[in-house]
Amino acid sequence: MIKEFIKNLKEYVDYLMKVNFKDLLINTIILICILLLAAFAYIPASILRDIIRSFITAFTSFNGVTSMLFECLFKIVGYGCCIWAFMYLFNKRFDDIKAFEEQVKGEEPKKVVVNKNKSKDTDVEEIELPKTKSN
């Protein structure tokens, strides 16, 4: 996953160097949303830390160096989860830069719908074409 993340990050940086300011703003907002979603990965680690800490303090005193090491360990685990979540979400979003470019530009991928009506012995294909805008 890390190799794929680095490859996608390089392609994304190359893409960012070619966009205009409007698209750059859109990409910045997308990255902020991915960061916020990745930050939610810290919550389960915090909940687990609190449950374990409560269980330990119920049976023994828990302060001093061991308490600091415990907190540090779970912060590292939480940050690791956040980094893993960011890499996963980034890879999912920017795996195909060409499709992403088309989506940002607002272009829908061209769909060709083929309806086969079987009448007697011949197959007639109907293609649904895009509709024109009417003002």
Image (spheres, helix red, strand yellow):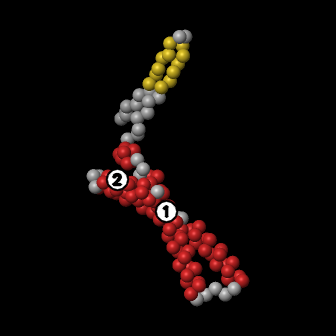
Q: Secondary structure at mark 1?
A: helix
Residue displayed at 39% across by 44% down: 99
In the rendering, which numbered label is found on residue 65? none
Residue 126 in percent (x, y) is at: 46, 22
Quadrant hosting residue 106? top left
> Given the current orientation, which residue lies at the most extreme front position?
3
Q: Identify which amino acid the numbered label 1 is placed on.
A: Trp
Instruction: Using the image as rendered, state which of residue 38 and residue 20 is in the foreground.
Output: 38
Residue displayed at 53% across by 78% down: 72
Q: Is residue 69 above or below residue 31?
A: below
Q: Residues within 10 Å of mark 1 (few under 14, many from 20)?
A: some
Q: Quadrant of the C terminus?
A: top left
Query: Which badge, 2 or 1, is on the more N-terminal residue?
Result: 2
Mark yes or no: residue 34 visible: no
Residue 50 in percent (x, y) is at: 62, 75
Residue displayed at 42% across by 50% down: 95
Q: Identify which amino acid the numbered label 2 is placed on.
A: Glu
Q: Is residue 129 above or below residue 104?
A: above
According to the picture, the residue beneath numbered tag 1 turns out to be 84
> Given the current orientation, which residue lies at the most extreme top position?
120
Residue displayed at 44% across by 30% down: 112
Q: Residues within 10 Å of mark 2 (few under 14, many from 20)?
A: some
Q: CA distance from mark 2 to mark 1?
A: 19 Å
Q: Secondary structure at mark 2?
A: helix
Residue 93 in percent (x, y) is at: 44, 52
In the rendering, which numbered label is found on residue 11? 2
Residue 18 in percent (x, y) is at: 27, 52
